[in-house]
Image (tube, grey):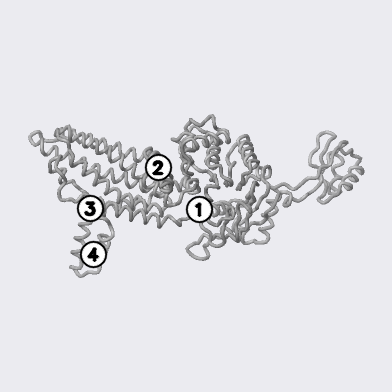
Amino acid sequence: MKQIIGWVRGPWAIAVYTYREGIRKRTLIGFLILSLLVIFGSSFISAFLDPTSRTDIELKLIKDICVATISIFGALITVFTSASVVPNEIENKVIYSILTKPIRRWQYLLGKFLGAQLIIIVNLALMGILFFAALYIRQGILPTLLLWALLLTYFEFLILSAFTFAISTAATSPVLPTIGGLFVYITGNLTEYLKDVQNRAGQTGKWLDDMLGRIAGILYDVLPNLQNFSLRNQIVNGMPNDPPTDVMIPNLMAYGLIWAVGGFLLAWLIFWRKEL
Amino acid sequence: MPAIRTFSLTKVYEGARAAQDVHALTDLNLEVRPGEIYGYLGPNGSGKTTTIKLILGLIFPTSGHVEVFGSRDIGSVEVKQRVGYLPEGAYYPDFLRGEEILRYYGRLYGLGGRELDRRVGAVMEQVGIAHARKRLLRSYSKGMRQRIGLAQALISDPDILILDEPTTGLDPIARKEIRDILAALRDAGKTLLVSSHELLEVELICDRVGILFEGVLQKQGTLAELLEARDLQVEVDGWKPELAEQLSGKGVVLDDAVGARAKLRMPPGSAVDAAVAVCRDLKLNIIGITPRRETLEELFVRVVKSARQQNPAVAAASGDGAK
C-alpha cells in the first residue's frame, strides 16, 4: 500500500502542477470565454426570430447552439491541452529537472495526462453549468439529461485527449499533435461516412475509387467512433429530464476507457526510450 | 569508489545517411571523485551537455556505460535520490512563489509534511533567497532564478550535484555568490560536476578539470598536474625606458612599468639565478620574484590548438574556436 502511495504521489504532484499551469494559458482562457459568451448569448436568440414562431423553435435553437458550442470548444480545449503539456516542457527544458528526480517516465506521463484531464473536466464543467442554468431558467425543469450528455462528452474527449497526447510524446512542439488531434476528432465524428465510402467503393471499377474505399475502411477500423457519444438529437428534441435512450452508458464509458488506456500505452511506448 | 565514472562512453546522433552522423562523444572515460568539484570544460558543441544527459539517463549511449556510485542502473529511484541537477537556462513558472516551486520538486522526491517544509526552508537559506520565499517568481532577478534552480537541485540533499553552466549570464556579484555556495557545498562533502565556459570561475573553485573537444576528452587531472610552470615575473626598481631595447635582446618581456618600477617576464624555463643575473646586468634592484603558472585559459587554448593540429578535418568542421 505504501509503495502504491509512493507511485501515485509523484504523478499527482505533476498533475496538480500541470493543471495550475494549464488554466493560465491564454489560448485556453480565450476558448473558454468565447464558449461561455456563445452559450450565454444563445439565450438572447429570440430577438432575431419571427415573434410568431417562438417557443419551441427558439428552445431548440438554444439547445442546438449550446450543444455545438460545448462540443467544438471542448474539443479544441482538449486538443490544445493534450497537444502541449509534454512538448512545452521539452521546449522550455523543465522536463530535464523533473525526469532527473526519482520519477519514472511512465509516472511523468501519467501526471501530465491526469493534469490535462483536470483542465478538460473543469472547462467542460464550466460550460455545462452555464448551459444547465440556461435550460433550467427557460423551462423550469432540471435538465438531468444534460448531465448524462456531459458525462458522455467527457468520455469522447478522453479518447481524443489520449490520442493527441500519444502523438505529442513523439513531437517536440505542439503543432503536429494539434493537427493530429483535430484529424482524430473530425474523422472520429465521420466514421459512419467512412463506412459509406467503403461500402460504395469498387462500383466504378476505377483504381482510385477502390483505393479510397480501402483507406476509408482502414480509418473506420482504426479510429474510434466518436459519434456514439452524442446525445445531441435527444437533447434538442426531447424533454430535458428524460433518461438517455438508444445508448448504453456503461458500455460507452468502458469503450472510452479502453481507447484511453490504449492511447496512453502508445504514448508510453513512444516516450520510454525517447531521447530528450 | 568514484562518484561518477564513464566507461568508453560513445554517443552518435544518427543522420539520414552514415555521412550525416554526428559523433558527439567518443570513448569517454571520465572520473569524478567523491567530495570534489570537477570542472568540465569545452567549447560550444564539444559534447559537455551530451555527457551530462547520458549521466542523467535523459539520452542513451551508443556504446559504453555510466556508473554513479558504482551502480549502472542510473535510471533507478535509488540513484536519482542521490543526484541533483541544474539544467542550463531552465524555465521556472512565473505564477508560482519561490517556496511553491520547491515544494513541487520536493514532492517528486517523495517528501511531504514537516520534512518538506524543513527542506524548503533549509535550501532557500542555503542559496540566500529565504527573504523571497513568498514572492512570485516573476519578481525574481536572473541571479535569484539561478538560485531557485540551484535550490531545486538541492532539495533532497543529494550527494552529487550536476550543474550545467551555473554562472552563465550572471553579473560578477551574483557569480561570486554562486561560487561561494558551490565551495560551501564541496566543503560539506558534496560532489560537484560543473560544466562551464567560464574558465576563471572553474580555476577558482575546481579541484580537477576535464577538457573536452569534439567529443574527445583531451586532458583530465588536478590543476596542479595540468597547468605548466611557465616563467618568472620579476618586480624591479630603477627602471628606465631606455633599457627596453636591452631587455628584448635578452628575451625578457616588459609586462608593466610605472615610474621607476617595472614588472619583467623572464623567458620560459629561466632559473632564478638567470633572472637575478639579468637584473644585475641592467643595474635594476629586485623587489620580488614570482614564479608564474600557466592559467587555465592558456591551458585550454593550448589543448584545443593541439587537438586541432592533430585533426585538421575536425578543426575545419568546428570553426568556432575555443572560448
Residue furthest to the top in view is B131
**Would you say residue A86 is visible in this rendering?**
no
First in sequence: mark 3 vs mark 4 = 4
Q: Residues within 10 Å of mark 3 (few under 14, many from 20)?
A: few
Residue carrying label 3: A251
CB under 8 Å between discs 3 and 1:
no
Distance of mark 2 from mark 1, alpha carbons?
A: 24 Å
CB under 8 Å between discs 3 and 4:
no
- In the image: residue B16, left or right of residue B314: left
Distance of mark 2 from mark 3, alpha carbons?
A: 30 Å
Residue carrying label 4: A213
Q: Nearer the viewer, residue B129 or B14?
A: B129
Residue furthest to the left in view is A52
Mark seen at residue A18:
2
Q: Nearer the viewer, residue A37 or A252?
A: A252
Mark 3 secondary-structure assignment = helix
The residue at the point 55 percent across, 59 percent down is B11
Frontmost of labels 2 and 1 is 1
Residue carrying label 1: B76
CB under 8 Å between discs 2 and 4:
no
First in sequence: mark 2 vs mark 3 = 2
Q: Nearer the viewer, residue A36 or B70?
A: B70
- In the image: residue A133, left or right of residue B142: left
Same chain for mark 2 and mark 4? The answer is yes
Question: Which three-letter amino acid code belongs to the residue tagged 4?
Answer: Gly
Same chain for mark 3 and mark 4? The answer is yes
Same chain for mark 2 and mark 1? The answer is no
Q: Which chain hosts label 4?
A: A
Q: Position of residue A25 (x, y in %)?
A: 38, 39
Mark 1 secondary-structure assignment = loop
